[in-house]
Amino acid sequence: MPDGRQKEEMPDVTLLGNQGTRYVFNYDPDVLEVFDNKHPGRDYFVKFNCPEFTSLCPVTGQPDFATLYISYIPERKMVESKSLKLYLFSFRNHGDFHEDCVNIIMNDLITLMEPRYIEVWGKFTPRGGISIDPYCNWGRPGTKYERMAEHRLLNHDLYPEKVDNR
């Protein structure tokens, strides 16, 4: 049985276990932290279900609520979950359209981790009788992950996930 991770292996993880958590109320990608992937020789998905995402409509200032699904295949770096939670919380007072929010999140995570593959799917609660569910993805150019991204984009809504919070 391999030993678990040691604190010395995670010098960039500062938020997890910190009792003095500072909540940021305006968009801030600098709150994101990473740790090393101990299994870079294997493809596997990491999936975050984030049912409490909030942002603001850029026109009306009214709140928008969503469940975000963030899935990725890591390369060398992985996002630390508490930092992801605080990062998503930083959208609370951020005014942008739903489509912009999911693309901003994906772009920030690509910059942070340089994953093999990533997708972000926002399931926003209805406003005015219409729900908007933007989906974006990315695969590393010139690899099988680029082809995978194209395939998943073309087929992403064949079997939509059921969201129970709306």
Image (cartoon, rainbow, N blue to C red):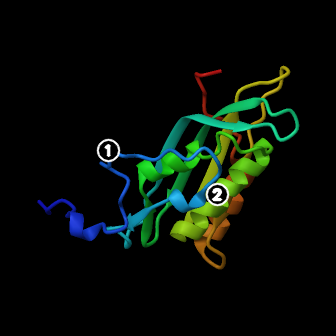
The quadrant the N terminus occupies is bottom left
Q: SS of the residue at dot 2? A: helix
- Which residue sits furthest left? 1
Label 2 belongs to which residue? 106
Vertical placement of 146 versus 120: above or below?
below
Q: Position of residue 128 (x, y in %)?
A: 85, 21
Q: Of 65 and 146, which appears nearest the observer?
A: 65
| Label 1 crowd bin: few (<14), some (14–19), many (20+), radius 10 Å | few
Residue 124 in sight here? yes
Mark 2: amino acid:
Met
User: Which residue sits at x=70%, y=56%?
Assistant: 104
User: Which residue sits at x=80%, y=24%?
Assistant: 127
Vertical placement of 72 versus 143: above or below?
above
In the picture, residue 36 is in which quadrant?
bottom left
Mark 1: amino acid:
Gln
Residue 115 in sight here? no
What label does residue 163 carry, if any?
none
Camera-side mark, 1 or 2: 1
- Left or right side of 69 for 3: left
Asked whether the beta carbons under mark 1 and mark 2 sit within 8 Å of each other, the answer is no
- Left or right side of 20 for 120: right
Label 1 belongs to which residue? 19
Q: SS of the residue at dot 1? A: loop
User: Which residue sits at x=59%, y=69%?
Assistant: 111
User: Which residue sits at x=30%, y=66%?
Assistant: 10
The quadrant the C terminus occupies is top right
Q: Position of residue 80 (x, y in %)?
A: 41, 56
Sequence-earlier tag: 1 or 2: 1
Q: Position of residue 83 (x, y in %)?
A: 46, 52
The answer for how far apart the CA atoms under marks 1 and 2 are is 28 Å
